[in-house]
Image (tube, grey):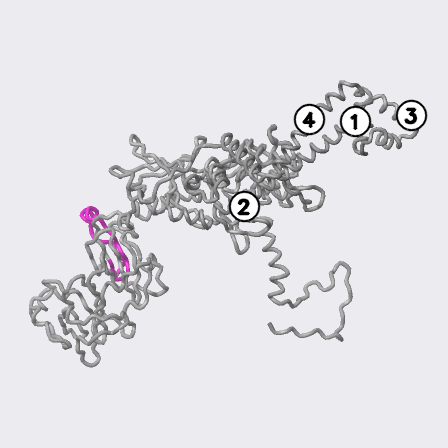
Amino acid sequence: MPPRKKKNPTASVPPKVHGVIEGAGEVVEQHITDTLEQNYMPYAMSVIMSRAIPEIDGFKPSHRKLLYTMYKMGLLGAARTKSANIVGQTMKLNPHGDSAIYDTMVRLSRGYEALLHPYIDSKGNFGKFYSRDMAWAASRYTEARLDDICQELFGDIDKDTVDFVDNYDNTMKEPTLLPATYPSVLVNANTGIAVGMASSICPFNLEEVCQTTIAFMKDPNHDLASTLLAPDFPGGGYLIYDKDAMESVYKTGRGSLKVRSRYAYDKSAHCIDVTQIPPTATVEAIVEKVVDLVRQGKIKEIADIRDETGLNGLKITIDLKRGADPEKLMQRLFKMTPMEDSFSCNFNVLVGGVPKVMGVGELLEEWTAFRVECVKRRTQFELTKKLEKLHLLRGLQAILLDIDKAVAIVRNTEEETQVVPNLMQGFTIDQVQAEYVAEIKLRHLNREYILKRTEEIAGLEKDTAHLQAILASQTKIKNIIITELERVMKKYGQPRKTMLVYAEDVPEIPLEETIPDYPVHLFFSREGYFKKITPQSLRMSGEHKLKEGDSISQQVEATNACDLLFFTDRAAVYKAKASDFPDTKASLIGEYVAAKLGMEEGENAIYMAVTKDYSGHMLFFFENGKAARIEMQSYATKTNRRRLVGAYSNKEPVAGICYLPEPGEVLVTATDGRMLLVGSETVPVKTTRGTLGVNVMTLRKAQRVAIALVYVDGMLKKPERYRKSLPSAGMLPGSEELSGEQLSL
């Protein structure tokens, strides 16, 4: 970047004006690397660390702040409160607008149905995850509380199991993680897009996750697939089980899974009811795609489609036409609509403040380490509390020997400040014990009370010994975690919602079979209009309706599944399928090919080739008398490319284009009327599409080739007269040719 000119120090300085910031609007030079380091990198790190990527407890900061706020509001096991109240309280921890916080709350709710095990028990309209148009009600109308499963998130949070930090204005404390007693990171779906990275964790069945975690803790070499069958999506559906793809997800944390809709065929009503869809699809997207396919004529078996989603759940009803096969139709809809979609997995999780993509095994290993630390801290917290109480009770036990002495010490002490030191000296106890004894109420200075308190000493000694043994044994800590997992599994486990279908059992339908194939008549006019008419419609039709001055240049009998190649006047070819065009009638003008296929401005289609297997050859005749023969296979592409440039040579104007599926003859006519029958086999095949080919017709001065047509028997009365060795000037038509209508072609 060239340096800017320095300001002239002697230039006049404008006077200061009240209310104007000095230097505002001044352009300051800064290197792009400095801008990235000082401005962009902090933003990127903030998004990665504090917004988009979940941590090992399975929550993003926005989720954690919301749930912790609800916990502190006493909404665990209590009555619901207005959502607006929750949103307002959450702002003490989450410095965002109420809309963003409420959106987060909706996605965690039971009513939204996006999670296998929702964290929020909601009341009111919370929308649905499978509908983009079904909006949730405002926060002032809905109510919520924490769901029962949140007991597994907050049960130990007050026992020093996790670290707490200050909130954004240092007025409150909030947890850095939630001490979940089960691997919540795998149970509920979590997706997020950060800067330069993203996270997409698919949900698994709670019971399977707990079983797998227990087995993994007992044996690090445990086969995960034997207990963790596959992801389990809250919307149900069928997961197409691919062993290789599943192993990739389990080992690397990356992979793609196919999920398809679940449906039922109602024979009495002759309709299909779709009741479960993939997690990445919406009802509206499916309906719109099906309607679009019907309008394009690609699907003809559907009479009507309706969204009947209501209080009973999701439902898309597809009415079928008479004779339609529901199984074959659904297989085609899986191929052509979002009724079957892919879920991309990217198990990117923050571990110790570092984003890391992990497989299921590594993720369980990290969660186990996190949970072990939580149990250790909880055990240490409980041990400390019991040791403190034991210490106090031992001091109380000491005065049991002589209660009267303790009373006498207190009565005979002149100054209050000397009570504790005198008790310490009289009973050989420390200051903490003496403070505890000194605070005992007068009514408790009886033998019964003191005996009951000191009887707890034996129990406390036993408990502290047990807790110390736990801290000293890694095995005992893991056994505690396993016991908690078994409890969670028994209490909250539920059957799978997503059923498995093995990939080898799914029929693969080739693309050709997805297009209904039936006889059609194809018409192409000189002005570039195209019509596709069924034989029945053609028989019932009258004359063709065309633009003024237009005429039919080509008529081909074919099928709806054939390919169409439209060659243009700019040496390009546009590929399409007959099924891309709707069936029409002769009484309509048809579709303008240039507009339908998105040709360039001023580009016109001049010839239509119809093929199904790309057999035979294309012949190009140029005005200078040359001809080129190109194999039709050179226009067959593996990808669905619509436009191919360099379809033929643009060095000379083209006079005629002919497609010959089998060897035949072409009638070439010059501007002076001379005609020549050219056998396709006499023109050598060229491998390069851009070639001019060889000379086939010798032209006189100022003459050129006018037209070239595929020869059909009967076009000439004496065809042998026009068959010559190439190159040849051809022959003028005889009187027998001029007397008929043959030359009108």
Determine the CA span between mark 2 and mark 4: 38 Å
Q: Position of residue 657 (x, y in %)?
A: 22, 66
- Badge 1 vs badge 3, beta-carbon distance below 8 Å: no
Marks 2, 4: nearer the viewer: 4
Under circle 4, the secondary element is: helix
Under circle 1, the secondary element is: helix
- Badge 2 vs badge 4, beta-carbon distance below 8 Å: no
Does residue 565 appear to the left or right of 720 in the view shown? right
Residues drawn in magenta: 524-548
Determine the CA span between mark 1 and mark 3: 19 Å
Q: Label 1 belongs to which residue?
A: 398
Residue density around tag 3, few if under 14, some if 14–19, many if 20 or more, within 10 Å:
few
Determine the CA span between mark 4 and mark 3: 34 Å
* Residue nearest the viewer, comparing 705 with 75: 75
- Quadrant showing the N terminus: bottom right
Q: Position of residue 453 (x, y in %)?
A: 73, 23
Marks 2, 3: nearer the viewer: 3
Give the residue at x 69% y 32%.
386
Does residue 564 appear to the left or right of 317 in the view shown? left
Q: Label 4 belongs to which residue?
A: 458
| Residue kind at label 3, given as amino acid type | Asn
Under circle 2, the secondary element is: helix
Marks 1, 2: nearer the viewer: 1
Q: Label 3 belongs to which residue?
A: 412
